[in-house]
Image (spheres, rainbow, N blue to C red):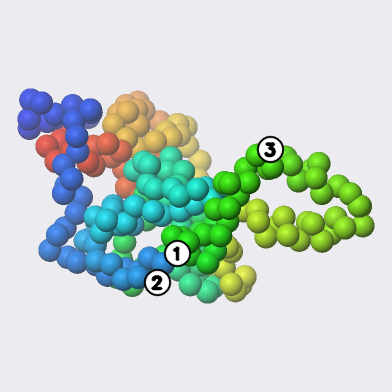
Amino acid sequence: MAFRSNSSSATPMTRPNATARIDRNKPVQFTFDGRSYTGFAGDTLASALLANDVHLVGRSFKYHRPRGILSAGSEEPNALIRLGKRAYAEPNLRATQIEIFDGLYAESQNRMPSLKFDIGAINSVLGRFFPAGFYYKTFMWPASMWMSYEHVIRHAAGLGKAADDHNDPDRYEKTHAHCDVLVAGGGAAGLMAAMQAAKGGARVILADEQNEFGGWLLGEANISIG
C-alpha cells in the first residue's frame, strides 16, 4: 500500500482542504440550544457551528468559564454536548465527532439557565474559596447534615444530563471476533500495518474510533491510496 500525492507540496503537515469533506450542494438543517442553523452534508457539528459564527459551546467543569472548540477529533475537551431528546438523549458527546443530519437536535451542558448567561460563573469569582477537594473538608460537620450537603454537591457535579427516560429504546450491534493481529488506529500507519500483517497470512482486525478509516488522509484532497 502506498500513499501518493498529486501535488509535490502535499505532506502530512499540509493544511487540509477546507471543503474536501463537505458537499455544499446539500444543505442540512440542525438545532443547537433551541436555535436553528444551516450546515452542509459532511460537516461535523463543530465545523457547522463555527461556520455559523458560534464559538461559545460550553462551560468549564468547576468555574463555569466560557469554552470554545479547541480541536478536531476525540481529543476535544470543551465541545461536549447532549444529542437528541427524551429517551434518545445522549450526554457528553464531542461536537467534533458528530456528523450533522437534517433534524439534529443538540444542547450545550453544564450551564443554567443558558450558555451565555450562566449563574454558575460566579464560581470563578469565588474560586479562592473552592480549592481542590474543598467539599471533603468543608462539609464534614455536622455529620447529620451530610445527606443535605451531598444532595447539593451531586447536582453541581458532572457535566451532561442522562436521558429523561432510562428505558433505552435503541438496539446495538455487537460481535465476538478473534484475530492474530489487532491494529488500533485506521490512519496511514494503521492501514499500512494491517496490510502488511494480512499479506503475511495473519487474521487482522483494524479498529478505529472514527466511522471511517483514513485519519489525516481524509482531509487531503490530493492524496490517493494504492
| Location of residue 45 in the rendering, given as x and y in whole percent from the top left corner | 33, 57
Residue 66 appears left or right of 4: right
Q: Nearer the viewer, residue 173 or 7?
A: 7
State which tag comes first along the sequence, 2 or 3. Answer: 2
Circle 3: residue type: Ala
Q: Quadrant of residue 10?
A: top left
Residue furthest to the left in view is 7
Q: Residue at x 57, y 68 (%)?
A: 163
Give the Cα distance between marks 3 and 1: 28 Å
The answer to whether residue 1 is above or below residue 26 is: above
Circle 1: residue type: Glu
Circle 2: residue type: Gly
Q: Residues within 10 Å of mark 3 (few under 14, many from 20)?
A: few
Residue under pointer 2: 34
Residue under pointer 1: 107
| Location of residue 48 in the rendering, given as x and y in whole percent from the top left corner | 28, 57
Residue under pointer 3: 132
Whether tag 1 and tag 2 are in contact, CB under 8 A, the answer is: yes
State which tag comes first along the sequence, 1 or 2. Answer: 2
Nearer to us: label 3 or label 1 = 3
Give the Cα distance between marks 1 and 2: 8 Å
In the picture, which quadrant includes the N terminus? top left
- Secondary-structure class at tag 3: loop
Q: Residues within 10 Å of mark 1 (few under 14, many from 20)?
A: many
Q: Is any part of residue 204 visible from this angle?
A: no
Residue 122 appears left or right of 181: right
